[in-house]
Image (spheres, rainbow, N blue to C red):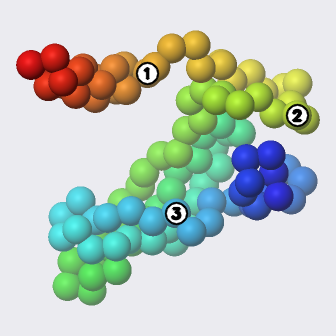
């Protein structure tokens, strides 16, 4: 188990995306990853397939490492990931309406 309490999903330098699912943007059925393409250590493309046979949508999505929330105890010196210094713009955008509702 890692410090965060999750099982590591890699061995050595092999990175795998497992058990990640999302909903189909067309029919809202579950979709699963059929293939992943590691482009760089920080960027992977995922090929999703909708599980609804009547829909059949297949698409590519991306998985990107954006920033570090908790630094690694065994950092790779070749990888530079920024530390989270402030909330991301999307986090600010979600927090502002809630703060406005609370004030109003």
In which quadrant of the rendered image does the N terminus lie? bottom right
Q: Nearer the viewer, mark 3 or mark 2?
A: 2
Label 3 vs 1, first from the N-terminus: 3
Q: Quadrant of residue 104?
A: top left
Displayed quadrant of residue 14 = bottom right
The percent position of residue 27, horizontal first and vertical second, equals: 18, 70
Residue 66, compared with residue 19, is above or below; it is above
User: Badge 2: how crowded within 10 Å, few (<14), some, or many (20+)?
Assistant: few
Residue at mark 3 to residue at mark 1: CA–CA distance = 23 Å
Find disc 2 in the rendering and name its residue.
73
Q: Residue furthest front?
A: 103
**Alpha-carbon neighbours of circle 3 within 10 Å: few (<14), some, or many (≥20)?**
few
Q: Report whether 64 appears left or right of 50.
A: right
Q: Nearer the viewer, mark 3 or mark 1?
A: 1
Q: Residue furthest top?
A: 85
Point 28% across, 29% down: residue: 94
Categorize mark 1 by other alpha carbons within 10 Å: few (<14), some (14-19), many (20+): few
Quick one: 79 or 37, which is closer to the camera? 79
Residue at screen point 71% across, 31% down: 70
């Amino acid at each position: 188990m890692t410090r965060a309490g999750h099982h590591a999903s890699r061995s050595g330098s092999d990175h795998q995306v497992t058990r990640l699912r999302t909903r189909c943007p067309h029919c809202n059925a579950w979709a699963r990853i059929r293939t992943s393409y590691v482009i760089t250590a920080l960027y992977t493309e995922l090929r999703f397939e909708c599980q609804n046979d009547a829909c059949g949508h297949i698409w590519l999505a991306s998985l990107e490492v954006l920033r570090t929330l908790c630094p690694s105890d065994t950092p790779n010196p070749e990888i530079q990931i920024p530390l989270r210094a402030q909330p991301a713009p999307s986090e600010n955008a979600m927090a502002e309406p809630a703060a406005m509702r609370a004030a109003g």
